[in-house]
Image (cartoon, helix red, strand yellow):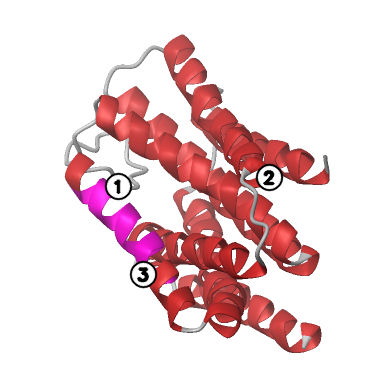
């Protein structure tokens, strides 16, 4: 039940991010950029220093293979469907059809799955993962709605799609709990798979978005705060 609650919080953070443009609430470009940079640091450090490290420690080369599988799965799907984070209302570089919506939902599903398997593997790891998921789902929700509005979605339809994408995080958590990982070895592979997706999202989606504004010196500072904060947690845990 605790895992489902955290998945609901992750879904809620997606809706909160998407509600900003839908409710016409002001959010400066600079503040969004700093949030994205911080989220990228937290997500990347959680993936590298906790999820991937634990998977490789428990499963060795098989854990590394699981990480690669998670990374390549998102890469291949995203490049095929031409899905990419974009927060500009006049963004015209991306195809936005059913495949794109499925891709965004797939991201959300994997986030929920990561929460479930991480908690099952180790509760402390699960807490770090949920923090990383909540942080990066806010700019993801914002970006998703901006893309929909730029492609002439009505606000009512955008709300429906946003809610459906957010809800898939809960479905992902249910799936993670339902899969019988009776052997800790296979559970560690699932953690590695999720860590690979964190690695991809942080480096391919969030960091490029954060560094679109190359004139703000605070962007790398916020990234490092997020990254080093999670890294410090790994030493405290040990």
Q: Position of residue 9 (x, y in %)?
A: 72, 40
Does label 1 or label 3 sit earlier along the sequence?
A: 3
* Eye-nearest disc, 3 or 2: 2
The residues bearing labels 3 and 2 have C-alpha atoms spaced at a distance of: 23 Å
Location of residue 112 by image quarter: top right
Residue that lies at the very extreme toward the right in this rendered image? 2
Q: Which residue is the site of mark 1?
A: 84
Q: Is residue 185 visible?
A: yes
Q: 219 or 76: nearer the eye?
A: 76
SS of the residue under disc 2 = helix
Whether residue 107 sits left or right of residue 97 in the image: it is right
- Are the residues at dot 3 and dot 2 in contact (C-beta closer than 8 Å)? no
Q: Which image quadrant: the C terminus?
A: bottom right
Is residue 70 a member of the stretch shown in magenta?
Answer: yes
Q: Which mark is residue 233?
A: none
User: Label 2: few (<14), some or many (≥20) within 10 Å?
Assistant: some
User: Label 1: few (<14), some or many (≥20) within 10 Å?
Assistant: many
SS of the residue under disc 3 = helix
* Residue under the point 24% across and 53% down: 76
* Residue under the point 35% across and 24% down: 149
Q: 101 or 69: nearer the eye?
A: 69
* Eye-nearest disc, 2 or 1: 2
Q: Is residue 49 visible?
A: no
The residues bearing labels 1 and 3 have C-alpha atoms spaced at a distance of: 20 Å
Q: Which residues are magenta?
A: 67-79
Does label 3 or label 2 sit earlier along the sequence?
A: 3
Q: 158 or 119: nearer the eye?
A: 119
Q: Which residue is the site of mark 3?
A: 68
Q: Which residue is the site of mark 2?
A: 177
Q: Position of residue 111 (x, y in %)?
A: 55, 49
Is residue 8 a member of the stretch shown in magenta?
Answer: no
């Amino acid at each position: 039940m605790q895992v489902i609650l955290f998945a609901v919080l992750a879904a809620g953070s997606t809706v909160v991010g998407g509600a900003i443009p839908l409710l016409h609430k002001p959010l400066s470009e600079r503040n969004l950029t700093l949030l994205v940079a911080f989220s990228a640091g937290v997500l990347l450090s959680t993936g590298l220093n906790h999820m991937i490290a634990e998977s490789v420690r428990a499963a060795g080369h098989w854990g590394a293979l699981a990480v690669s599988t998670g990374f390549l799965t998102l890469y291949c799907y995203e490049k095929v469907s031409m899905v990419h984070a974009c927060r500009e209302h006049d963004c015209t570089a991306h195809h936005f059809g059913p495949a794109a919506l499925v891709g965004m939902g797939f991201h959300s599903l994997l986030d929920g799955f990561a929460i479930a398997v991480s908690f099952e593997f180790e509760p402390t790891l699960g807490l770090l993962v949920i923090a990383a998921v909540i942080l990066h789902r806010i700019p993801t929700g914002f970006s998703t709605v901006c893309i929909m509005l730029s492609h002439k979605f009505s606000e009512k339809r955008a709300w429906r799609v946003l809610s459906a994408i957010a809800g898939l995080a809960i479905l992902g958590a249910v799936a993670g709990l339902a899969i019988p990982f009776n052997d800790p070895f296979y559970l560690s592979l699932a953690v590695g798979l999720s860590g690979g997706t964190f690695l991809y999202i942080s480096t391919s989606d969030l960091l490029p978005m954060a560094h679109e504004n190359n004139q703000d010196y605070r962007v790398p500072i916020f990234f490092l705060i997020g990254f080093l904060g999670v890294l410090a947690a790994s030493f405290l845990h040990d």
